[in-house]
Amino acid sequence: MTGRRLRSRDITAIDLNSEYLGVPRRILMENAGAEVARAVAENVDDLGSKRVVVLAGSGNNGGDALVAARHLASLAKEVHVLLISRTGEPRTEEARDAWEAVRRMAFTVRCHVLTGDEVPTELRELISSADVIIDGVFGTGIRGDIGRPYSEVFALVNSSRATVFAVDVPSGVNPDTGEYSKRVRADFTVCLHAAKPFVDLVDAGRVLVRPIGAPPEAELIAGPGDAEVALSGLRRDVTVRMTYDGSELALGARLLLERLVADLRVVGGEGFSVDAEGGAQFSTVRGRGVLLITSGAHRDPGEALSSVRARSESAGCPVWALGGFDPFASKDHLKANWLEPEHVTEPTRGAMVALAALLSASVELHYAVGASIYLTRRVLRETANPPSDVGAYLNALCDRIESSSRQNR
């Protein structure tokens, strides 16, 4: 199958950055469910005579399936929804709203709930009698072994005569590695936004890729999605090396790293550079990893990104233009921020570079840079710009990093 592949972390970043851009996950869920329903309508003959059984887990994958059930209610002969949840309701606010909507559809949708390990006879018969099954049990977050009641539900689906549509990924399959212990065998898999790596590793039936309205800018903006991904693996137990040239840029980097890491090794030398063990090197000297330059005056982020991309292609390395929108370009990725206050002092820019260097030891370069752009500029919004006290700004930044890291553990 041609086209790009997006991993679980990429989808997480896109979802959060879409929300940051004004497109909440509720809208993405609505679009996703509508696309799943459309895929069913386009690929099932005589849908008006068919019984559709929608299997919904407690997460947002289940929420997508619940929305699909609502759309299919006017198209199929019967629509049944089986919510599989220990608590009897979905976990997320968006999915709970979707569940409440179908529960209120007293004439066109019949709702059932499974909370225990045993699948009652009537639910076994319901699954076995389906003409179409929508699998929205597990999404891109599934990891580990599959226990009951899920293993029994999967077996019932796989032994049924139904045409099975999986939402985003067949339940039980790790979307990034294709690994599974038990899984749903799908006739169709509706991949949302883009295909996932598993499509090259597992038979997922016919794979249909459908857009769900995430803005293309969600992959360009340095936003909370980048921070979510980058901070989930933050390591402070690494050695960080810095070439200190006495500049204000280097000073800001040094002051932040003294607060964040235990092993900071500083030497004097030409130009400023910083790198964490296992990560990328960031330097004002060409030929040492990510090249740091001063951003020109650009009217908009598109112009800034085009300029830094051209510079990166010319230099043959990643380039980060500090100032303005803080645009960054590597071979495959672009990042900038146009929603938060820009850095107007060298020490805060230096702190931004230092944070990116530290994060790059545990996550891909573009996420490390995106997270550092967003976090350092966001703290400017929450404190003052320019900071009246650089030390107070750095302390606030460290507090934000610590609190966000705890939430991601």
Image (cartoon, rainbow, N blue to C red):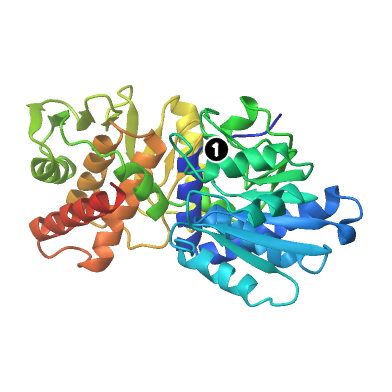
Q: Is residue 92 left or right of residue 265?
A: right
User: What is the count of numbered marks?
Assistant: 1
Where is residue 294 drawn, in percent x and y?
Answer: 33, 43
Three-letter amino acid code of the residue under disc 1: Gly
Above or below residue 18? Residue 361 is: above
Viewport quadrant of the N terminus: top right
Where is residue 241 drawn, in percent x and y?
Answer: 15, 27
**From this viewpoint, which residue is outermost toward the top?**
287
- Depth order, front residue of 221/261: 261
- Depth order, front residue of 277/293: 277
Q: Is residue 58 left or right of residue 282?
A: right
Q: Is residue 300 left or right of residue 2?
A: left
**From this viewpoint, which residue is outermost toward the right?**
46
Residue 28 in view of the camera: no
Q: Residue at x 75, y 72 (%)?
A: 108
Q: Considering the numbered disc 1 on the image, is that residue within a helix, a strand or a loop?
A: loop
Q: Residue at x 39, y 33 (%)?
A: 364
Where is residue 45 drawn, in percent x and y?
Answer: 90, 51
Q: Is residue 46 left or right of residue 55?
A: right
- Residue 123 falls in which quadrant of the image? bottom right
Where is residue 285 drawn, in percent x and y?
Answer: 27, 27
Above or below residue 265? Residue 107 is: below
- Residue 238 falls in which quadrant of the image? top left
Q: Residue at x 59, y 31 (%)?
A: 198
- Residue 394 falls in which quadrant of the image? bottom left
Residue position for label 1:
172
Above or below residue 230? Residue 174 is: above
Other-residue count near label 1 (Cα within 10 Å), few / some / many at <14 / 14–19 / ≥20: many
Q: Residue at x 70, y 67 (%)?
A: 70
